[in-house]
Amino acid sequence: MFCREWLAQLGRHQAEIEAAGLRVVAVGIGEPKHAQHFCPTLAPHATCISLPEPLAHHAYGLRVASLSNLVNVQTLKHGWRAMREGHMQTRATGDERQLGGTFVVSRSGIVEFAQVSAIAGDHADIPTVLAAHRAWEAHNL
């Protein structure tokens, strides 16, 4: 549910993301068919990759949730938010405990922005991500 919600948010902000000179690459856990199923509808301009193991997730320091990271008042609020937007939980692919994150990586491989989810549904604020990218560019270019 939260992965679909995040892809939809990225899709809605695609014009702003592209205007900032950024490209969306979404990495999920599962089989490639899972990415091919959701990406074209929710974030058609994103490059979506689905890996059977969370290799990229581990490389970027993303957390695996404990029960308290998955079931708490804030996560229930996030779930309610996602459901109000039409994102329902169906059969999960991959490890449901794997939390997400958002990273802006420069062409030279420097991480300009990092947000590591602390709980399920803890997405980055896209205007904040774009502002951080613009600030990084202003300081480093």
Image (tube, rainbow, N blue to C red):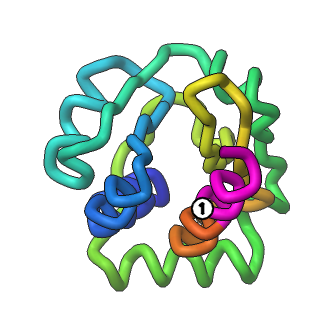
Q: Tell me which residue sits at (36%, 18%) in the image.
A: 31
Check disc 1 and report its element: helix, strand or loop.
helix
The vertical placement of 123 against 140, above or below, is below
| Residue toward you, 96 or 117 | 117
Task: Tell me: residue 3, above or below residue 62.
Answer: below
Foreground: 107 or 127? 107
| Residue marked by disc 1 | 134
Using the image as rendered, state which of residue 62 and residue 126 is in the foreground: 126
Residue 17: say if magenta. Answer: no
Q: Nearer the viewer, residue 93 or 130?
A: 130
- Quadrant of the snapshot with the N terminus: bottom left
Question: Measuring 27% from the left and 74% from the top, which residue is drawn there?
Answer: 86
Q: Which residues are magenta?
A: 132-141
- Percent position (x, y) of residue 7? 37, 54
**Identity of the residue furthest to the front in this view:** 141
Find residue 60 and report its image quarter: top right
Crowd band around label 1 with a 10 angstrom C-alpha radius: few (<14), some (14–19), many (20+): some
Question: Any magenta on residue 133?
Answer: yes
Is residue 16 toward the left or the right of residue 51 in the image? left
Q: Is residue 2 left or right of 141 when viewed as pictured?
A: left
- Going 76% across and 38% down the picture, which residue do you hit? 62
Observer able to see residue 35: yes
Residue 11 point in image, percent of width and height: 28, 59
Q: Position of residue 88 (x, y in %)?
A: 34, 65
Left or right of 105 in this view: 94: left
The image quadrant where one finds the C terminus is: top right
Tell me, yes or no, if residue 100 can be seen here: no
- Residue 15 % position (x, y): 27, 63
Q: Is residue 110 left or right of residue 23?
A: right
Q: Main secondary structure of the magenta part?
A: helix
Q: Mark 1: which amino acid?
A: Arg
